[in-house]
Image: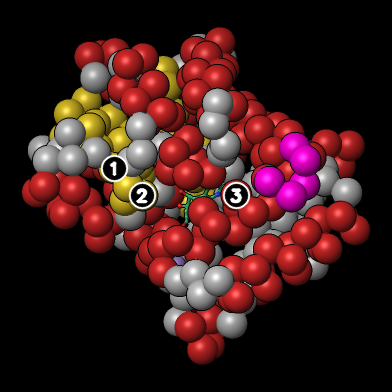
């Protein structure tokens, strides 16, 4: 069912490191034309670290792990639907293309046998979820999908406390990469501390192996903060966030449109400051994911 590119298939058969990347961040999370350049840079960074990039998307109805350069360009330039796990059967059935979220990227990458995935920020429980019930499928899918996701935590547009509680309920381990504090995407720190900290990719690979040995199929969240000197100015961040959330409420945005709406509002109104941090943190996550994937392949 899943089409794996020759390059990714070869890496998987030879047991060399592979890092999955999502496509919603390209199609809906980053503005054009920076999105295509960023997508290409992300892949280049993985190659430079000695691993094989596997960007995931549905291309004309085919779930694809490892995109050609033409396919990557299509994701960045065509108007492609955001496809979480529940949308996959629909876009596949209709034979159309879909940009995959953390949930659907994790799901398809795991089906192909990829064990490590780098993204920007996870989806989570939205503020006001006690009324709207808005909780990203990223969380429930990670509860049943054996992949390790490196992220800079969750965006502060979400309810970070509730997101961490849900991850605990869903039995998804959350470990800080060289930090005791859960990061807040554009900011290096949230108000929430972590139970576990690791110092290296090798430690994460050992945790993955233990999870496998137990027969568990949960994902593992590795929280990797953007360094303090790269974070967004906290005061501007807080102000922009309030504005973006108020605007989303006022415009009656709901469902899967909420996250892209808030992200593009912030990119538009922060004059590039948030975008620069967003690109930096993905890059930092890719570096850690490549380290984990390398340690994982050395263990096999
Ligand atoms: N974080 C980003 N940019 C993004 C997203 C997260 O920095 O574009 C996307 C991811 O694909 C994530 C999705 O899986 O938003 C979550 O959407 P929702 O809240 O609708 O589940
Ligand atoms: Mn939602």
**Which residue is disc 1 drawn over?**
98
Which residue is painted at 53% across and 87% down in the image? 130
Q: Earlier in the sequence, mark 2 or mark 3?
A: 2
Relative depth, front residue between 37 and 294: 37
The answer to whether residue 107 is magenta is: no
Ligand 2 sits in which quadrant?
A: bottom left
Residue linked to disc 2: 82
The secondary structure type at the circle numbered 3 is helix
Q: Is residue 270 magenta?
A: yes
Q: Nearer the viewer, mark 3 or mark 1?
A: 3
Please name the predominant secondary structure of the magenta segment in the image: loop
Locate the N terminus by quadrant: top left
**Going by the image, does 102 lie left or right of 246?**
left
Q: Distance between the residues labelled 2 and 1?
A: 6 Å
User: Which of the numbered marks, if any, corresponds to residue 225?
Assistant: none
Tell me residue 109's x, y (percent).
31, 38
The answer to whether the residue labelled 2 contacts the one labelled 1, judged by CB atoms less than 8 Å apart, is: yes
The answer to which of marks 2 and 1 sits earlier in the sequence is 2
The mark lying in front, picked from 2 and 3, is: 3
Note whether ligand 1 is within 8 Å of mark 2.
yes
Q: Name the residue under label 3.
A: 264
Q: Give the range drawn in magenta.
A: 268-272
Observer-nearest residue: 215 or 28? 28
Q: Answer yes or no: do the residues labelled 2 and 3 have beta carbons within 8 Å?
A: no
Rendering quarter of residue 34: top right
Element type where label 2 sits in the image: strand
Q: Which residue lies furthest to the bottom in this view?
A: 131
Left or right side of 97 for 176:
right
Between residue 17 and residue 271, name the one nearer to us. 271
Q: Distance between the residues labelled 3 and 1?
A: 19 Å
Q: Is residue 204 among what the camera can see?
A: no
């Amino acid at each position: 069912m899943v089409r794996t590119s020759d390059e990714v298939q070869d890496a998987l058969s030879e047991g060399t490191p592979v890092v999955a990347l999502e496509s919603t961040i390209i199609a809906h999370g980053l503005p054009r034309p920076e999105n295509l350049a960023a997508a290409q840079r992300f892949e280049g960074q993985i190659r430079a670290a000695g691993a094989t990039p596997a960007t995931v998307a549905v291309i004309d109805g085919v779930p694809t792990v490892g995109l050609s350069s033409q396919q990557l360009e299509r994701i960045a330039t065509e108007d492609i639907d955001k496809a979480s796990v529940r949308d996959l059967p629909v876009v596949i059935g209709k034979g159309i293309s879909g940009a995959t979220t953390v949930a659907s990227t994790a799901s398809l990458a795991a089906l192909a046998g990829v064990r490590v995935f780098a993204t920007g920020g996870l989806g989570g429980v939205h503020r006001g979820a006690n009324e709207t019930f808005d909780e990203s499928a990223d969380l429930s899918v990670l509860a049943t999908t054996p992949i390790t996701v490196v992220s800079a935590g969750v965006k502060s547009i979400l309810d970070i406390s509730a997101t961490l509680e849900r991850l605990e309920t869903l039995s998804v381990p959350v470990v800080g990469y060289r930090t005791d504090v859960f990061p807040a995407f554009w900011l290096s720190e949230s108000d929430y501390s972590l139970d576990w900290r690791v110092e290296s990719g090798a430690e994460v690979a050992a945790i993955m192996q233990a999870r496998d040995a137990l027969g568990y199929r949960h994902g593992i969240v590795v929280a990797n903060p953007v360094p303090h000197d790269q974070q967004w100015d906290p005061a501007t961040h807080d102000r922009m966030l309030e504005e973006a959330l108020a605007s989303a409420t006022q415009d009656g945005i709901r469902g899967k449109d909420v996250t892209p709406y808030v992200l593009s509002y912030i990119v538009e109104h922060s004059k590039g400051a948030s975008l620069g941090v967003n690109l930096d943190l993905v890059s930092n996550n890719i570096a850690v994911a490549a380290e984990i994937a390398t340690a994982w392949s050395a263990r096999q």
